[in-house]
Amino acid sequence: MATTNIVDKDGNTISASDATVPSDRHFRGAWTLSGSTISEDLATAKDIFKDKVREVRKPLLDAEDVIYMKALEADDASAKAASVTKKTNLRDAPAASAIADATTIAELKAAWDADLLGDSPYAQE
């Protein structure tokens, strides 16, 4: 019978049967091995989180570009200003202080701005 191994972010390997594995796999790419215990490296998890923000915001920015162009064609100054504000907020989302200030994985997950980005991919299932 083949043994299943777990490899952490640094390439360290342990048999899955010998490891204490986090129940949450959202930040699997941030796993780090210490003895037989696997935990998440917070700095790497923050990078993964920011990449997810960038992935989710891309279609939102594309949609906002359409809204802005319609406002431009209609010469609607307030709609243009609102669109510019939303696009700025989307661009700034990966640099949110809540992400930088998170000291735990739970705080990092709570840093998802659902009002701006929509439903969190990190919500409890």
Image (spheres, helix red, strand yellow):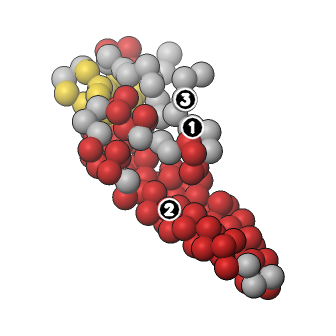
Q: CA distance from mark 1 to mark 3?
A: 6 Å
Image coordinates of residue 53 in percent, x first then y, are 50, 52
Please identify the quarter of the rendering in which residue 80 is found: bottom right
Near mark 1 (Cα within 10 A), the count class, few <14, some 14-19 or many ≥20, is some
Query: Secondary structure beneath disc 3?
Result: loop
Please name the amino acid that badge 3 sits on: Ala
Identify the residue under disc 1: 121
Quadrant of the image occupied by residue 121: top right
Residue bearing the label numbered 3 = 123
Badges 2 and 1: C-beta atoms under 8 Å apart?
A: no
Q: Which numbered disc covers residue 89?
A: 2
Tell me where residue 124 appears, x and y as whole percent. Answer: 54, 23
Give amino acid for label 2.
Answer: Asn
Q: In front of the other: label 2 or label 3?
A: 2
Q: Residue at x 29, y 39 (%)?
A: 102
Residue found at x 67% / y 79%: 77
- Image quadrant for the C terminus? top right
